[in-house]
Image: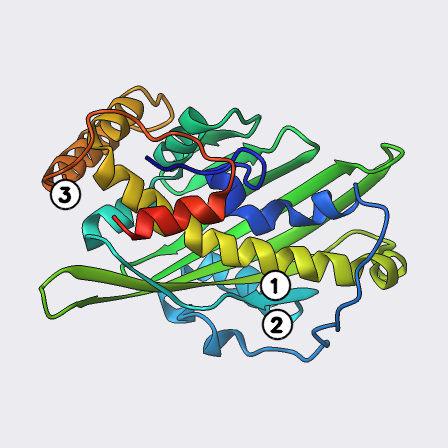
Amino acid sequence: MTGPSRDRSRSAVGKALGVLLTLGACLTLGHATAEAGIGWSKLDPAQIVPMEQIPVEFREPVAEVIRDCTFHRKGEAEAFPCDPSLYLSLVNEPAITLALWKDLADNPVSLKRLGPDDYSGDDGMGSSAAWRFVLRSPKTHVVLANVSYVGGPRGGAQIDARVVLVLRAGYYREVNKQPYIQHDVEAFVKVDSRGWKTLARTFRPLIEKLMDEQVKEAGQFVSLMSRLVVSYPDWATDVAMREPEATPETRAQFRTLVAANRLPDASPGRPVVMADAAQAAMDSRRR
């Protein structure tokens, strides 16, 4: 049995939306690593996301973050077996995905559903975020978030930033008819805090390094969770049905999807947390 690591990962929020909290984490570290900067060239938002599908009132805020981003990272595409409906359920319902993760590893991260498309979260270490799904479609998800961090070595640092996360997905079937997902995650961060340019010389390389890790792990997290759900359906259903931040309709739909995708050799138990998340992912892929 496999499961996620206690030490390397925070939560579903920390994974699927882990970039939101990266800036705060960086200021708790007292050094920078050597890594080349990404440059400051402007990007064309229309080439990144389908702006015409985003509600009018959110188009300019999304475009501004992409166009004037302080940091930009795009993860490598990952392919894995998963039913499209189950995949979309895990992506669209962060309250359930977080509940599954927290059941496997002690974690201070909290999430609150504010509305059909709005959520807020806190990592318990000084970073908080409020975000909205401004686009949810089978092929593209776009999240617009406001992030705040208060803390640092002396407890006086405060950083505010806006983030746009883009998740792109494609769907296909192998010759054996098994459905596969291929997706990638792209992140844009625009730091709004005064005095950031002074800090940038010191912290920019470190933040870029952590963003690389977070964007990569965000994509891997969803694929790992999908495998755990189909391998341990009783556990997944039990956790989801007890999650108060998910609506009754959402819980019922998730239970139906889990039952429909149950593997013939599925375990009636629950995953066991492993010390090495990478090993967990490899073991899960061999199932």
Q: Residues within 10 Å of mark 2 (few under 14, many from 20)?
A: many
Q: Along the line of sight, which residue is nearer the eye, 56 or 158? A: 158
Q: Is 192 left or right of 202, judged from the image as shown?
A: left
Mark whose residue sits in front, 3 or 2: 3
Q: Which residue is denoted by mark 3 in the rendering?
A: 261
Q: Along the line of sight, which residue is nearer the eye, 277 or 235? A: 277
* SS type, badge 3: loop
Q: Verify CB contact (< 8 Å) between mark 2 and mark 1.
A: yes
What residue lies at 39% left-to-right and 71% top-to-bottom?
50
Mark whose residue sits in front, 1 or 3: 3
- Identify which amino acid the numbered label 2 is placed on: Arg
Going from the N terminus, do you reach mark 3 or mark 2 first? 2
Between the residue at mark 1 and the residue at mark 3, the CA separation in whole angstroms equals 38 Å
Displayed quadrant of residue 54: bottom left
Q: Number of labelled discs?
A: 3
* SS type, badge 2: helix
Q: Which residue is denoted by mark 1 in the rendering?
A: 65
What residue lies at 22% left-to-right and 46% top-to-bottom?
86
* SS type, badge 1: helix
33 relative to 21, above or below: below
234 relative to 187, above or below: above
Between the residue at mark 2 and the residue at mark 1, the CA separation in whole angstroms equals 6 Å
Q: Along the line of sight, which residue is nearer the eye, 169 or 263? A: 263
Q: Which residue is denoted by mark 2 in the rendering?
A: 67
What residue lies at 41% left-to-right and 44% top-to-bottom?
280
Displayed quadrant of residue 213: bottom right
Q: Position of residue 36 (x, y in %)?
A: 75, 73
- Identify which amino acid the numbered label 3 is placed on: Asn
